Image (cartoon, grey):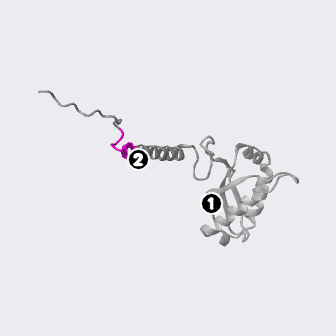
Amino acid sequence: MARPAEPAVSAAPDETADGAPARKSKKKLFVILGLVVLLGAGGAGAWFFTRGADASGKSADEAPKVPVFLALETFTVNLQDGEQYLQTDITLQVTDPAQVDAIKLHMPRVRSRLLTLLSSKHADELATADDKKKLAQEIREQIKQPFDPKGQPQQVDDVLFTSFVIQ
């Protein structure tokens, strides 16, 4: 028996019987686009967190500033009331070693300014923590004043009391 001939397929496999191309599934396209967006977001996040900048905008190339301290010799002064004296050790925190050199160069002026300031105080003006903070600010202002008439002020970040005795 002879087999009947099958009709020849004239349309390409992508086309339907009426000649229009078959619609491919867009699922694969959305998956690929989703992966690209996800990888891009991940890369952007990684770049943001590792780009070398902190919240203040300083780059990682800038090393964090190491504090520079300068301990002054002990100050012993009679207080204003005449019956009591103050003995204190002061350490200055400055911006850089150049400031240390400038202050050391003018140490007689620094000591004179601070002795004058400290000896002008009464014991009751130095009793509380707030009083000591105020004194530290006054010391800072005294040291920041230029040593030369047309000189630059010193850069003093902090004044620290390492010893503070009133007797």
Q: Is residue 61 left or right of residue 39?
A: right
Please tell me in which quadrant of the rendered image residue 128 appears: bottom right
Looking at the rendered image, the quarter that the N terminus falls into is top left
**Of residues 167 and 138, the one drawn nearer to the viewer in this rendering:** 138
Q: Where is residue 43 shown, x and y percent of the image? A: 49, 43
Q: Is residue 73 left or right of residue 17?
A: right
Q: Amino acid at mark 1?
A: Phe
Comes first in the chain, label 1 or label 2: 2
Q: Where is residue 100 shown, x and y percent of the image? A: 72, 46
Instruction: Estimate how packed mark 1 is, as few (under 14), some (14 to 19) or many (20 or more) residues with alpha carbons within 10 Å.
Output: some
Q: Amino acid at mark 2?
A: Phe
Q: Where is residue 76 shown, x and y percent of the image? A: 70, 58
Q: Residue at x 45, y 43 (%)?
A: 36
**Of residues 22 and 38, the one drawn nearer to the viewer in this rendering:** 22
Question: Which mark, residue 30?
Answer: 2
Residue with the most extreme left position? 1
Chain part drawn in magenta: 14-28
Looking at the rendered image, the quarter that the C terminus falls into is bottom right
The main secondary structure of the magenta stretch is loop
Residue at mark 1: 164
